[in-house]
Image (spheres, grey):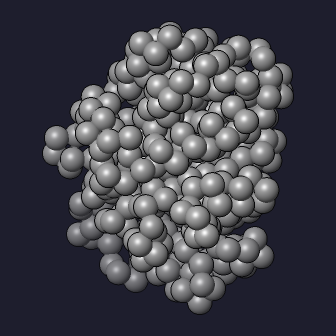
Amino acid sequence: MTPDRFAALWRSLEPIGRDPGSGGYLRYSWSRSDLAAREWFVEEALDRDLEVETDGNGNLWAWWGDPEGGDAVVTGSHLDSVPHGGAYDGPLGVVSGLLAIDLLRERGHGEPRRPIAVAVFTEEEGGRFGVPCLGSRLLTGSLDPAKALRLRDRDGVTLADAMTAADVDPSRLGADPARLQRIGAFVELHVEQGRALVDLDRPVGVASAIWPHGRWRFTLTGEGNHAGTTAMADRHDPMLTFAYLVLAANKEARLADALATVGRVAARPGATNAIAAEVTAWLDARAPEQSTLDGLVAAVVQRVSERAARDGTKVSWTAESLTPVVDFDGGLRDRLAVLLGPAGSPAPVLPTGAGHDAGVLAAHVPTAMLFVRNPSGVSHAPAEWASDVDCAAGVDALTAALADLAFR
Ligand code: GLV
Ligand code: MN
Ligand code: MN
Ligand code: MN
């Protein structure tokens, strides 16, 4: 595919949900900008004579071939973003799926032997309701729909109400084994979220595994009081405990060769001239091995509990999401690596610490991921970037993968 052709479709989606201030994206599920991005997808799919449907969990599917045919080859990704996220995380896989179908058709491929679909999964980032891969977890039955419906966004709006406001019936949420059974393979193309492909000087790679990871919400409770009249010795300040939580997470992650991030915090009541009464902080932790991850979180909990005892504050925590290690289908991975590299030089195979819908589907369906080089090495931030040339190479790779799976 020519870079210009990639760019033409890409640029039509790019403005939707971009914040002019940060240059990043605010595409939270079921928000106005998410709905606009979904509408963009539906129009592009209909323009291509694909059959479009919304499943009970709000995921979109655009079919080439019979949706009921079975053994389907599905590609796609997500259109939602983290707060002020980059343009490519998610949308690149959706745009590439549509363009791959264009290329397959132009190359004179008639109807595929196996149906092909481009899917858009809802709330992959957990940016609004806190649970990542919401749409794919519901589809696969790994998230209880009753629990999902009660999830609340920052403004207290439940998922049920957000879906209703978007004219989507929330009562159909939940596992969809019949749909899963009709999928024979899933291939998600995604922008790389680190620098491995840059260092290897290769435009496209294949995923081997996703590290186990999770999100924990800590509630640190102290005593709200006057900033000007409360002696330092008399304070029960949860912000101190919070500060220690951040330091402990960083230190323990370094010691364990793992990753820990406290990227979100809310202090109540949030007054400059009052000691906070309560702090809520979210820990994101990831490690190559489950035992390392468990040890890391346990160490953070222990250190912050010790600190809370000194601060006269209370700590409680709850796991908001847990994702065990994902090893992608070895046969599919190796076949795609050989198919996508030049002769004698398979595409690089790499693990990632980032979560994806592909990771959720992998427990049910033979699944693979393709990564496209990201020279910025940045993701979940506005600087995230991939060149049109590399994105076009990604489309070519996805096209080859779909041809191999659906036409052979
Ligand atoms: C989702 O993108 C995640 O890995 O946090
Ligand atoms: Mn993503
Ligand atoms: Mn992401
Ligand atoms: Mn992700």
Work out which residue is located at the far bottom of the displayed protein and give it: 255
Residue 72 in the image: state x and y as whole percent.
Answer: 73, 28
Q: Residue 348 occupies which quadrant of the picture?
A: bottom right
Does residue 318 appear to the left or right of 383 in the view shown? right
Q: Tell which of 311 and 215 is nearer to you.
A: 215
Residue 177 in the image: state x and y as whole percent.
Answer: 83, 27
Q: Residue 111 occupies which quadrant of the picture?
A: top right
Q: Tell which of 136 and 171 is nearer to you.
A: 136
Q: Is there any visible trace of residue 317 in the rendered image?
A: no
Q: Is there any visible trace of residue 407 in the rendered image?
A: yes
Please say if 266 is above or below 342: above
Does residue 399 appear to the left or right of 302 in the view shown? left
The residue shown at (58%, 25%) is: 109
Please say if 290 is above or below 66: below
Does residue 266 appear to the left or right of 352 in the view shown? left
Q: Quadrant of the C terminus?
A: top right
The residue shown at (69%, 31%) is: 407
Q: Quadrant of the N terminus?
A: top left
Q: Residue 294 occupies which quadrant of the picture?
A: bottom right
Please say if 77 is above or below 369: above
Please say if 372 is above or below 255: above
Figure label count: 0
The residue shown at (60%, 59%) is: 206
Does residue 168 appear to the left or right of 274 in the view shown? right
The residue shown at (77%, 76%) is: 291
Q: Tell which of 203 and 127 is nearer to you.
A: 203
Residue 346 in the image: state x and y as whole percent.
Answer: 61, 66
Residue 108 in the image: state x and y as whole percent.
Answer: 53, 24
